[in-house]
Amino acid sequence: METLMVDRVQNSLRFFMHRNAIFLCERLCAEFPTEINLQLLATCYLQNGKAYCAYQILKGTSMPHSRYLFAMSCFQMNLLQEAEAALCPANEPNVEVPDGAAGHYLLGLIYRYMGRQALAIEHLMQALTLDPLLWAAYDELCVLGAIEEANDYFSDMAAQRIQQQYLSESSSLNSSNGSEFYNLSSNMAVTSVDSIPRQSKQLGNNTREIASLPLSVMIAKVPASNSGSSNFSQYITPPAATQLSGVAPPPLCRNMHVSFNVANNDVSTKLNNIAVQAPRRKVLDEGKLRKVSGRLFSDSVPRRSTRLSAEAIAVASSNRLSAEAIAVASSNATQVIGNGNGHTSTKFLGGFSSSSSSKVNAASSRSLTFRKGHSWISENFDEGRRSEAFDDSRMENMATTSSSTSMSGDSRYLEQGKAIGDLAQDSRLINGAQELLCLLRTLGEGYRLSCSYRCQEALDAYLKLSEKQFNTGWVLSQVGKIHFELVNYFEADHFFDLARRVSPSILESMDIYSTVLYHMKEEMKLSYLAKELLSVDRLSPQAWCALGNCYSLQKDHETALKNFQRAVQLDSRFVYAHTLCGHEYVELEDFENGIKCYQSALQIDQRHYNSWYGLGVVYLRQEKFKFAEHHLHKAYNINPRSSVLMCYLGMTQHALQRNEDALEMIERAISADKQNPLPVYQKAIILVSLECYDEALNELEQLKESAPHESCVYALMGKIYKRFEMHEKAMLCFGLALDLKPPAADVATIKAAMEKLYLPDEMDDTL
């Protein structure tokens, strides 16, 4: 009952019938309350999203897998300290982490979200060492910035570890299966050996009834010989029934565990036809049987060793021996026929040579089973029958003397065939592992470079992929993220759109795609994306981030903030949702709550440079320039190739009156992204503060060509022309700036500058 219920629960889980699995497993635990069954019930709860139920039933358990499941339920409930205590008990410092690579991976995640980055990296690396194909651990290490080279983890050494793990698992599985089969076979043999003598006594002299016994009753298991070359079970028909019936039974070759190949069909046909059968004879009474027994068993019927040799050949053909094994058998097999004087003579059977009879004799020795030294013949039979049994046992002993040589020969060929098969399997396994690791090495290198914000190198790495691997949703979305970091929004839009076409239900990185559309001011496409993501999964944080960006683009920051908060509610570890909440608070000039949101994001991911950047901008707007420089420098250390971060860091240094450092940083920003107008504008402001008006005007003239719709550019040019007392050009620039509809604060500043156009020259640093 227990086995059946466990099987039904596992079957329900396999087909995602969680309600049925939980119901049956609860009945199972009520009937058989073992910890193993509790583990199965906890698995049902966890797969159905009921971590609190798994937490309740596993609390206090001690088995390794129970500790792992309990830690998983704690992790899903954000009880990180309890999860750590389950995997690493404080009172048992030397206990191993349960479930190998999976346990180390879970413990690494726990330490990461607890802010203990060094321990997180240690356990994630241990997980990846134990299982080189555990991509999730590699992903986390890349996010933490702890990966130097992908080749260090997906190398040829990793392929050898995979091979060793696979072979050890296969050998353990085979040994367990073999032991189960041996026990089953032993039970069958004991049952048949114990039952047949009782049935023989009941049947008495009715030889036809004995001959008609079922094969399942007449089969017995013979232990392997001392040579140790045979590792499979053999079953034969007891000889007494054969001799009494007068008809040799067909050779049995059931439950043979060796698989061979046949050289050709002709050999197989010949072997299948060599079944020596005795002619039918009448059953004599006891008086006449003694007189004719010598003649009857010397000339008219082949000896049992003859039948057994034929059975051995038939077994070889029925199990489809390899060409080499059949050739050897063909050259060695003989048929031994006894004459009346006790001598032996040989014949060729089916073209077999008579050089040796060892293999046939070995088969004969493995074909007989006696119980307690007696034959299978009933005690009710006469002395003639006993003499036959004695004569047969004598021939069997002769066959046994040569069995060790025969078994060693069989063993040699079996071992050679097994070795060839193992080599072929090992070769296929190592080739498959190397191909898979090569693919993971390419993907891993691209992902590592992307997480390190070495965007151009990451693009080059992904381009090495095959076409079918490159044109997948995950790779295309990664390429889209790279273009987003390069501030190449049009290319990012292109690749994200391709990713959605290839995989319409993809959710990963769609929050970044919504930010791309936000910067491109694609209101219609952004609205459509948000609607599509909600239709795919209303409980995904990516969908609510896209919807929030849609409202933020429409300047409805309060509604946008609610949508971002909904994303945080759905997944409190979704770091980008915290950052977007902070951005909206800053737009609403609620700097205190904005700082809290950025700090929450950094507690989840310390390398999320967007939050460091957000904190720097807040402190810059609050004129806390030292704090601003600190946080912006943190962001710059994480992503040293970002033109925006360089520009804001230069602005902060300029506010701290470190103009030389500011100019150097601004020059780096311009070199990093020549299409970004912001660093050019900031360079012009720094040059104006240094009274380098001509250079500043040249920069603004070039900027006007690349960004003709920026009102601040014309306003700054008006200020410079006013300093040169070129009032008409200054008035023209101020007018153009107002026509471009600048923000309300800038409108007031521009109008004030126009009113003071003919007053003494004083530059307004607020523009």
Image: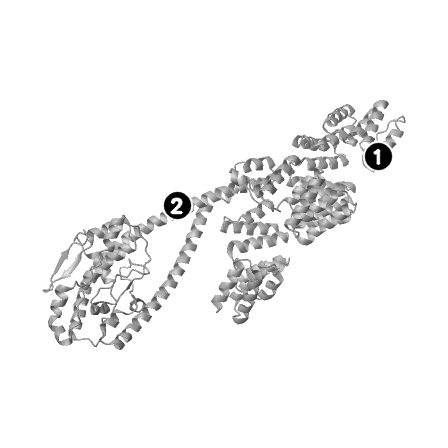
Q: Quadrant of the C terminus?
A: top right
Label 2 crowd (10 A; few <14 / some 14-19 / many >=20): few
Residue bearing mark 2: 427
Which three-letter amino acid code belongs to the residue tagged 1?
Val
Q: CA distance from mark 1 to mark 2?
A: 75 Å
> Which residue is depicted at the point 43% across and 51% down?
164
Question: Residue furthest toward the left?
Answer: 341
Tell me what residue is drawn at x 20 percent, y 67 percent: 246
* Mark 1 Cα shell of 10 Å, populated few (<14), some (14-19), many (≥20): some
Residue 40 at what x, y percent from top left?
Answer: 53, 63
- Compared across the picture, whether 653 is left or right of 256 comes to right
Sequence order check: which comes first, mark 1 or mark 2?
2
- In the depicted structure, whether residue 617 falls above or below residue 291: above
Q: As rendered, which of 123 and 35 lies closer to the eye?
A: 35
Element marked by disc 1: helix
Q: Label 2 amino acid?
A: Ser
Q: Position of residue 440 (x, y in %)?
A: 51, 43
